[in-house]
Image (cartoon, helix red, strand yellow):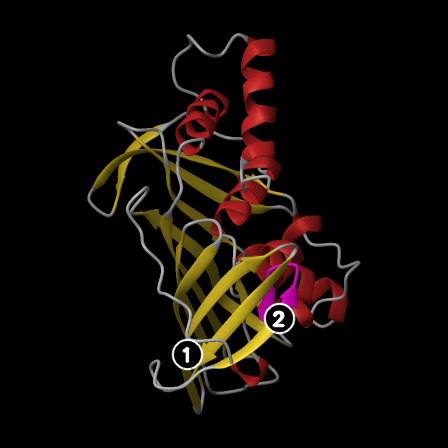
Amino acid sequence: MKRPGSRFAALLCAAALALGLAGCGHSFKSDSVRAAGALAGVESLRADTELLLELAPGIINEGETLGLAVRVSAVTNGERTSGEAAVSTAGMDAALSYIAERQGEDWRFYLSLDGGESWLGSRVTGGEIDVGQAGFTLSAAPLEMLEFYLELASGFSEPVDCEAGSVPCRRYDGVFPGERLIEALRMTGGGSIAESLPEDAEIPDVPLSVYFGAEDSLPRRLELNLTGALAQYMDEALGLPGLIAIDCLTVSVTLGDYGSAVPATPPAEL
């Protein structure tokens, strides 16, 4: 079975040969090549995703600020993923635990709403499941999500020395194509936001920052700022600026525990 990230690694290695990047200094392309090499031996990792949305007082919600926070953790070994997900918004808080295991081309999902005391099981094609009224989507393949972002992003700056958590990193600031934003949201917890946008929505490119570990070149963090792009889209699509005032909309994915993350074991077959 093809391991997630293998296509990404092959593409970047080919680019390295064609462009002679292997011996060069640091750039987004050269660090991506090094990351692909480092990821080739990775069997497990942890990905913590956070989506934050704040709607400032506007015509629809005059006099009040509305917020939405979605947080999803994923511990994966490629064939199995487990973690927790939580969503908080006005008048509603929801949390769940989940385990997903690849079975051929499908995934077997197990969901628990009581901290693992009891489980519900289902089979899903494609590795994603919509968690109903909780309003977000879980992806069973963080490595495939990482591949998706790194392949499509472009226009990166020179590296900036920084940290992601306590890990020294090089940060690159670039853009992610607006025409692929709906797919990106579905992969990173924003299923409810993605479903509110038409498939043919013309969304401007959005700022994206990528952090690579300074010592191991492994991807450590992705930050996507959708605030300006979606605010512009809403104003143009609705034809009435200020109808929905987006004050903040960001997505971040923090990556770690490479090679040491161990997902939970599925419950007995339901």
Q: Over which residues does the magenta segment extend?
A: 123-129
Q: Is residue 114 left or right of residue 92?
A: left
Report the residue at 47% width, 49% height from top: 78
Residue at 63% from the left image edge and 54% from the top image edge: 104
Q: Which one is nearer the viewer's eye here, 65 or 154?
A: 154
Most extreme residue toward the front is 268
**Residue at the spot 37% in from the left edge and 65% down from the top edge:** 265
User: Residue 56, position in %: x, y?
Assistant: 49, 75
Q: Which of 57 and 71 is in front in this view?
A: 71
Q: Which of marks 1 and 2 is nearer the N terminus?
A: 1
Secondary structure of the magenta portion, mostly?
strand
Residue identifier under label 2: 123
Residue at x 59%, y 36% (from the top left corner): 151
Q: What residue type is labelled 2?
A: Arg
In this rendering, the answer to whether 58 lies above or below 78 is: below
Can residue 154 be seen? no
Q: How crowded is mark 1: few (under 14 residues within 10 Å), some or many (20 or more)?
A: some
The location of residue 70, given as percent across then percent down, is: 44, 71
Indicate the position of residue 138 as horizontal and vertical percent values: 52, 66
Q: Would you say 183 lies left or right of 39 here? A: right
Picture layout, residue 199 above or below residue 168: below
* Neighbours of disc 2 within 10 Å: few (<14), some (14-19), many (20+): some
Which disc is residue 96 wearing? 1
Q: In this view, does 239 lie above or below 178?
A: below
Q: Distance between the residues labelled 1 and 2?
A: 18 Å
